[in-house]
Amino acid sequence: MTEKGAALNDHDFMKALFDLVIPPSASGDLPGAGALGLEPAVATALQADPLLGPLVEAGAQAVREAALSQHPKGLPGMASEARTKVVEGQLATHPLLIMGMSRYLYAAYYQHPRILECIGEPPRPPFPEGFDVEAIDAELLEKLLARRVSGVRKE
Amino acid sequence: MANEPVGVLVIGAGASGAAFAWSIADTGMSVLCLDQGPWMKQEDYPSNGLDWEARGMGDFSPSPNVRGLPADYPVNEQHSDISPLMFNAVGGSTILWAAHFPRLTPRDFRTKSEDGVGEDWPIDYQTLEPYFAQNDRMMGVSGLAGDPAYPYHEPTLPPLPFGKTGNTLAAGFEKLGWHWWPSDSAILSREYEGRAACINLGPCLSGCAQGAKASTDITYWPAAQRKGVQLRTGCRVREITMGADGMADGVLYYDAEGQLQEQKAEIVVLACNGIGTPRLLLNSKGRQHPDGLANSSGLVGKNLMFHPYAMITGIFEESLQGRRGPMGCSFWSHEFYRTDRSRGFVRGYSFEAIRGFGPVQTALWGMIRGFIPWGEDHHRQFARLYDHTATLLAITEDLPEETNTVTLDPELTDAHGIPAPKVTYRVSENSRKMLAHAVERGREALTAAGAVETVAEPLFREAGWHLMGTARMGRDPGTSVVNERGQAHDVKNLFIVDGSVFVTAGGVNPTSTIQAFALYAADSIKKNIETLFDHA
């Protein structure tokens, strides 16, 4: 029996799990989710979620223990294929493990400046710079104007 | 220390309460507004940070049950097909709305006469027309005059830019020969009245850090306060109190420190939305009104209407730069708005073209829909979706049904021990047929626009923004709660000015009409002040 929260607070384990969910891209442009130091933020968010938190924590715990039973270093010590098998082996009893964790992992990953740059977004908040956006297509606008109803301002 | 009595006490500082308070201040009466929420600060809005999408699902979620902030009260939605959404602050739900700003159409006010369903309103479009215009000027509305779907009116400012997403989708509608028109949007395309123009931040639904989107904390409230209206925040009203003469004489409320306070008033006005208003009326029980205040018709809390939404998303090969620009505002379509019985349902729906998802939402949406797996193929599938989607929302007209209700939950309470509202709501067969029709037409439009694949959510559960009908207006006290100017039939100095008074819902966003009605009700009081209590 492992102490409560052990899996979520085991950063090496979580990094390995994150890299399984979002691995580095084949081209190497995008880092895996385990390379960005997201573990504390995701663990904190999960621990504050009364619905998903316990489900993910139980699943992560089961994966951690299963991995440790197969390899002395647990999940971080295993090759990618073996890691996948261990996780998949727990999904029948912990079906919300990946989906629940991804609720917070995806949020953390896809708001990281490095990832934003890689996917073609400026690594900054929307405000204060904002964005330029195309105007209404002139040809479309012309068609609209041709069929608008006319009138006088009543108010 | 007792609070000084006031002339007019408005409960709720959102869309309708702000408009009403601003207008009624012209009477010279003392006007006080109580709101359970705080003032918001633009520097606190999520778009100031990289975590804007995550916060939109957390402390800026539209669901009070997800946020659970001190200003929020819980809503029991276990028996509802649609989750009620709202925001509790000065500005109310206009803090988090899309600011898509259509008016109800003239025909929407007479569904019984037109189609034999619902009920006719005791007022019509023409009655509200000057108030629509007044409201447009106060909020600041961008759009294009001349939409054939509406009586002629001129938006305050030119339309917002469509972006590549809007242009792509509009081309699809054009190809099919379907009606489409740039939306009236309560977002500034140009600087207006000291407010800055929109800079296309994107996440309008979690507050506008630029202040270009109209929320009543930055539109009506500064003007109302200049007229002398007082606004007290952090104050949650528990019940309306009654005098021996059968008139409301004030309220009991919990102040920001949690202390029970009494506030006396000559006129009490409810602007707490279609859930908060019936909740307060039902909680204001007394010996003379054991079923709640203003409820001799038994209709308080009944006829709850949302707008059931379908969401149809197209996946495109080209990049659409979709998450930039006002999220909910580019164009609308009324192609399927009017009744055509050959379709198998009565009434109709509008389409609202919205922009693309941000990266986090893309990833989560793709995961939930089964498009984006975990593991090796994650990046390839994400790249296929991100910046390559555009969405149509179908907003269907919900017809009133007495079985759709807001009642008081027997167990659940808010932080002050006040019973929470319980929402019981089922989407009708007519609405389901309409949603199914909208999904097919939405797919058709997206395909015409170039989508290579379409995905539909035929009933979008997290879309209960529009809260209407739970204290409906009418001339007959036996079949309505308030009269045509929002005055309770049972309590002559009690007025309701929010979406609760809607008789039917139309198939468009209601805020423009809610606010126009609030201005009309205030004006009606001003014009009839001397005889106000003679003919309820």
Image (cartoon, grey):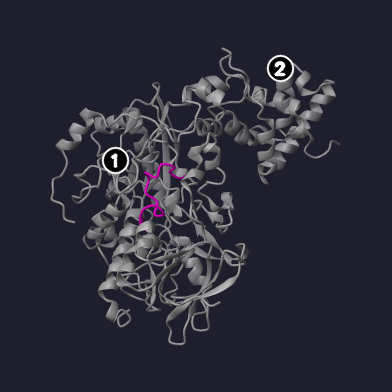
Q: Main secondary structure of the magenta part?
A: loop
Q: Is residue B404 in view from this perspective?
A: no
Q: Amino acid at mark 2?
A: Glu
Q: CA distance from mark 2 to mark 1?
A: 56 Å
**Over which residues does the magenta segment extend?**
B207-220
What mark, if any, has residue B190 been given in the picture?
Answer: 1
Task: Sort mark 1 into few (<14), some (14-19) or many (20+) by Cα contacts within 10 Å.
Answer: many
Q: Is residue B247 in view from this perspective?
A: yes
Q: Nearer the viewer, residue B79 or A72?
A: A72
Query: Looking at the picture, does residue B180 appear above or below residue A137?
Result: below
Q: In the rendering, at what x and y percent does residue B426 appear?
A: 48, 55
Q: Residue at x 37, y 33 (%)?
A: B443
Q: Nearer the viewer, residue A49 or B440?
A: A49
The residue tagged 2 is: A81
Q: Kindly identify which chain the residue marked by label 1 belongs to.
A: B
Query: Looking at the picture, does residue B413 appear above or below residue B490?
Result: above
